[in-house]
């Protein structure tokens, strides 16, 4: 989630005035909060998927490995032998899926981006809380936030549309609550 063209510091920030700068920072803090939340949600999904896939893979592999030591000469029903073969093929497919999709790696990428968005959000919160002496100080900070935000967004993994939609609904409901107060 990078800054839109109309939010970049392309015009002179002194024209916005201190109140406009403060409102812009509050808006950015709000958006950074939701970018952070979106990446954490996706990271948790990938981590759960990685864990479930890994547990299933371990159980199937252990099941198939146990039957490697059995003598199949009539001692075990044909259906069980077919089941063991199918479980072996299925565990191979699961291992391939886990290797190809890399859910653990994707979870870590999203978690790292969420942490970086959180750091930037806290910088904005501290700056707004302590205030700023003049428009030059505010302008410098706005440029710093814009640069860092763009840098974070440059190599951020894509957040799925379903998560963006859910976060968008949260944003809208929170804004309605803020406007009601």
Image: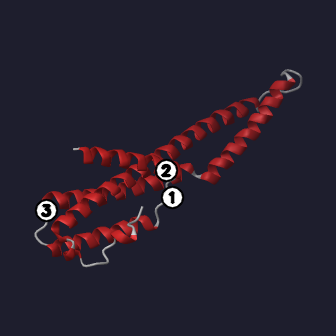
Residue 152 in the figure: left or right of residue 72: left
Residue at 16% of width from left, 68% of height from top? 18
Report helix, strand or loop for mark 2: helix
N-terminal-most mark, 1 or 2: 2
Residue 33 in the figure: left or right of residue 132: right
Residue 33 picture location, percent across and down: 33, 53
Residue at 47% of width from left, 56% of height from top? 109
* Quarter of the picture holding the C terminus: top left
Mark 2, residue position: 107
Which disc is residue 158 wearing? 1
Residue 161 picture location, percent across and down: 52, 52
Residue at the far front: name it: 180
N-terminal-most mark, 3 or 2: 2
Mark 3, residue position: 131
Report helix, strand or loop for mark 3: loop
N-terminal-most mark, 1 or 3: 3
Q: Quadrant of residue 115?
A: bottom left
Residue at the far left: name it: 133
**Along the line of sight, the residue nearer the viewer: 110 or 153:** 153
Structural distance between the alpha carbons of marks 1 and 3: 34 Å
Residue 63 picture location, percent across and down: 69, 30
**Along the line of sight, the residue nearer the viewer: 115 or 158:** 158
User: Few, some or many C-alpha atoms within 10 Å of disc 1 (few <14, some 14-19, many ≥20)?
Assistant: few
Q: Nearer the viewer, mark 1 or mark 2?
A: 1
Residue 11 lies, with reference to residue 69, above or below; the image says below
User: Few, some or many C-alpha atoms within 10 Å of disc 2 (few <14, some 14-19, many ≥20)?
Assistant: many
């Amino acid at each position: 989630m990078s800054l839109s063209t109309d939010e970049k510091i392309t015009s002179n920030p002194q024209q916005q005035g201190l109140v406009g700068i403060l409102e812009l920072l509050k808006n950015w803090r709000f958006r950074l909060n939701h970018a952070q939340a979106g990446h954490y949600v996706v990271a948790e999904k990938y981590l759960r998927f990685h864990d479930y896939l890994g547990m299933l893979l371990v159980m199937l592999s252990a099941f198939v490995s146990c039957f490697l030591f059995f003598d199949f000469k009539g001692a075990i029903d044909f259906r069980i032998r077919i089941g063991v073969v199918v479980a072996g093929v299925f565990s191979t497919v699961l291992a391939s899926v886990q290797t190809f999709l890399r859910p653990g790696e994707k979870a870590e990428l999203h978690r790292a981006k969420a942490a970086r968005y959180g750091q930037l959000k806290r910088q904005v919160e501290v700056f707004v809380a302590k205030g700023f002496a003049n428009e030059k100080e505010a302008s410098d900070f706005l440029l710093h936030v814009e640069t860092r935000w763009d840098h974070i967004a440059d190599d951020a993994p894509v957040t799925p549309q379903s998560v963006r939609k859910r976060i968008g609904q949260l944003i809208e409901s929170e804004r309605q609550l803020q406007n009601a107060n």
